[in-house]
Each structure stands twice: as structure tokens, then as C-alpha cells.
Image (spheres, grey):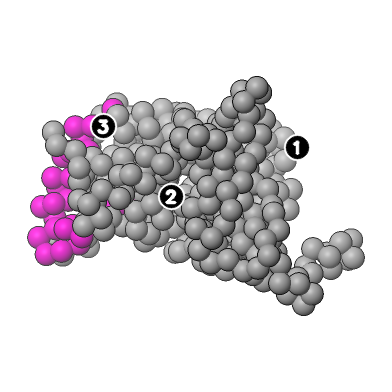
């Protein structure tokens, strides 16, 4: 095994100028990440310098067998924390050979919204709080929980310290550092209310970059849990009963909201979000009805509400924002398995472009 470790950690720069590019894309379920690697003649820093590639879409649920080729178009580059050196991770979106986005390519429409002049002028910032649960591989039960049983009730685990309160910290810290190495603007991590559930935050990130960074952060986490032999779950309610679910709270502001008097812009934006509550809920993740029950720090899925410092509301405005009269707000409705391209672009569309 030591030889295998030595080979994995070989420094390619000592013997060749060639690099390895890991192309990443989203599969047919909308949550399954896929990737494959190719050799390039030298370092690359701009996605436009990268070649298009293709894959068998019939094996990912994205194309029929008799016309299976799907094209990968590089969109964002990150440093590879696994291979290191000049090697890179490449976030791609997906197209037909004719150049049309395939139905599961949610980035394409999001990019159109973020390129709209009115949206560009508002410089939308996002901060996404990605919650997730670590599961034992053989039994799909939370990490370090007794198999078929339960730990003590919620209370001591949120931001807890100690072997009886914090399950999986080595994975979490490895992910934190790997994201920083990759160039992702990861802003923090914490243990969550349910044991074996954790959160990382990505942002602030502007426009489409929020989606690119969150997807690659998810990819890195998937790779680390693969190495650790642990299953990663983005299920919004992995354990039924008196246990917290998992969300992807989305913090949001525009240039107008961050300027003096921005609280009035925030209130108008929240009013518009309320008018499109059903449309947003429909796009905010699968299984969210099991999480948004009005309990466990959530609002009911069927009603829209907002409040200052209220974690039981659909939208939370922070005390600092209220005090300063400007800032940001938090949309607490998105599930942990939401697509950040969909959620961020929809929030921008509703609050900036949509006219009731």
C-alpha cells in the first residue's frame, strides 16, 4: 500500500510538462456527479483554452443508445487537490452534438439570466449553506450511530466537540482545506443539529460562479467520502422523526440591497418571492415536503413567511441588516439536494427581472 500511495502522490512536474484535467459534469438524475480525466500538453488557466469532449449519455440517463454522444463544454477551472501540481478540475455543462443544451443542463439558462444587463448591474452575491449527512457505507445509517438504533436526543451536537458529539470531523476538515486549495471561496464549516450532519458555506460568490463553486465543492466532498469509505447523503430528511433535516439556505443580496436604504429593496424583493412561492418551492429540491414541516427550524412548505432573526420563517432577515438598513437576506426554503444553478438564477430572476 505504501507503493500505491507513493504512485498516487507522484509529482508529474519533475518529469513532464503534461497535466491531467478532470472533467466534471452533472448526470441524468440532476444530483449524480460524473467525471473522467484526460491528458493535456501543458498548464491551462482559462476554460476557453480547453478542448470540448464527449461521453456516453446513454449510460448516464441523458441520451438514447442510438444517439448517445453528449458534448462536454468546459466552463470553470479549479486546482486539483487530489493530484495537485498544475493538474485541474474542470466544471462542464452538457450539449447535443448540434450545440443545443440537453434538458438536464441547468447552467445554460442560469447563465442567460446572470448575463442580463439588469442582473449584471445589480452584482448579485450569494452565500450558500450546504448541509449534508455522513452515512455508514454498509447500512446507510448515520456515521457512528448504533446500527438500527439512535444516539441521545438533539441538543449537544450542534457545533459540538468530543467523540460522543462530533462524528466525521476528519472528513469535514479535509474537505475544508481541499476546497481552499482548489480556489473555492468556502467561508466556513460547522457541525449541525443532528449528529453526523454537517454544513459548509460557499460564498460570497457573484452570479453563475456560485453554482460552479458549489457543484465542485460537492464533487470534492464526494471524492473525499469515497476515499474514507463513507456515503454522502444530500437527502433533505435522511432520518424521519424528531431529527433536523438538511437544507441549503441561500443568502442573497444585490448592489441596491447593500447600498444605503437597501432595506426597502430587500422588502420589495421578499414580497415578490412570496408571490412566486409555489414556483420556487417546486424548483427547490426533491423531497423538500419531508423537511419543510414548520418544525425543526423550518417554515411550512405551504405558506410563505418572513421575519427578522426568525429561523422558523421562509425568509430570514438578520439583525444587522435591520439595524443598518441595508445588507442581505436568507432564503431558508431550498433543500440540501437543490441545484444551485436553478436556485440562484431563480432568486435573481424573481427579485430583479420579474414584473408582477
Q: Residue at x 43, y 50 (%)?
A: 211
Residue 61 visible here: no
Residue named by callout 2? 211
Q: Residue furthest bottom?
A: 14
- Please identify the quadrant where the C terminus is shown: top left
Q: Earlier in the sequence, mark 1 or mark 3?
A: 1
The residue at the point 69 percent across, 52 percent down is 37
Q: Nearer the viewer, residue 202 or 317?
A: 202
Q: Which residue is mark 1?
A: 138
Measure how far apart labels 3 and 2 are at the Cα level: 21 Å
Q: Is residue 332 left or right of residue 307?
A: right
Quarter in which the N terminus is drawn: bottom right
Cα separation between marks 2 and 1: 31 Å
Principal secondary structure, stretch drawn in magenta: helix
Report the magenta residues as a range: 251-278
Q: Residues within 10 Å of mark 3 (few under 14, many from 20)?
A: some
| Along the viewing direction, whichever of 43 and 135 lies nearer the viewer | 43
For label 2, the SS is helix
Amino acid at each position: 500500500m505504501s507503493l500505491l500511495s507513493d504512485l498516487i502522490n507522484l509529482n508529474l512536474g519533475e518529469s513532464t510538462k503534461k497535466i491531467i484535467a478532470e472533467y466534471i459534469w452533472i448526470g441524468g438524475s440532476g444530483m449524480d456527479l460524473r467525471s473522467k480525466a484526460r491528458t493535456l500538453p501543458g498548464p491551462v488557466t482559462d476554460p476557453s483554452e480547453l478542448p470540448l469532449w464527449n461521453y456516453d449519455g446513454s449510460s448516464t440517463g441523458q441520451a438514447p443508445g442510438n444517439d448517445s454522444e453528449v458534448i462536454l463544454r468546459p466552463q470553470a477551472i479549479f486546482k486539483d487537490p487530489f493530484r495537485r501540481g498544475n493538474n485541474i478540475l474542470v466544471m462542464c455543462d452538457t450539449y447535443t452534438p448540434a450545440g443545443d443544451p440537453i434538458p438536464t443542463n441547468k447552467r445554460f439558462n442560469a447563465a442567460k439570466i446572470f448575463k442580463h444587463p439588469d442582473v449584471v448591474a445589480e452584482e448579485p452575491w450569494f452565500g450558500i449553506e450546504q448541509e449534508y449527512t455522513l452515512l455508514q457505507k454498509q447500512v446507510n445509517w448515520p456515521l457512528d450511530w448504533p446500527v438500527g438504533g439512535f444516539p441521545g436526543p438533539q441538543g449537544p451536537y450542534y457545533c459540538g466537540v468530543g467523540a460522543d458529539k462530533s462524528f466525521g470531523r476528519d472528513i469535514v476538515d479535509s474537505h475544508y482545506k481541499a476546497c481552499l486549495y482548489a480556489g473555492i471561496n468556502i467561508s466556513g464549516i460547522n457541525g449541525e443539529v443532528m449528529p453526523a450532519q454537517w454544513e459548509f458555506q460557499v460564498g460570497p460568490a457573484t452570479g453563475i460562479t456560485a453554482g460552479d463553486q458549489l457543484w465542485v465543492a460537492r464533487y470534492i466532498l464526494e471524492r473525499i467520502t469515497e476515499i474514507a469509505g463513507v456515503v454522502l447523503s444530500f437527502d433533505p430528511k435522511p432520518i424521519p422523526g424528531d431529527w433536523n433535516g438538511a437544507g441549503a439556505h441561500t443568502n442573497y443580496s444585490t448592489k441596491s440591497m447593500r447600498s444605503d436604504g437597501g432595506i426597502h429593496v430587500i422588502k420589495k424583493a421578499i414580497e415578490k418571492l412570496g408571490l412566486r412561492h409555489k414556483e420556487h418551492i417546486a424548483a427547490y429540491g426533491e423531497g423538500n415536503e419531508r423537511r419543510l414541516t414548520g418544525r425543526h427550524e423550518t417554515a411550512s412548505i405551504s405558506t410563505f413567511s418572513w421575519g427578522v432573526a426568525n429561523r422558523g420563517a421562509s425568509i430570514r432577515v438578520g439583525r444587522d441588516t435591520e439595524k443598518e438598513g441595508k445588507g442581505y437576506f436568507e432564503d431558508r426554503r431550498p433543500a440540501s439536494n437543490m441545484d444551485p444553478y436553478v436556485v440562484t438564477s431563480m432568486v435573481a430572476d424573481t427579485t430583479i427581472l420579474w414584473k408582477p
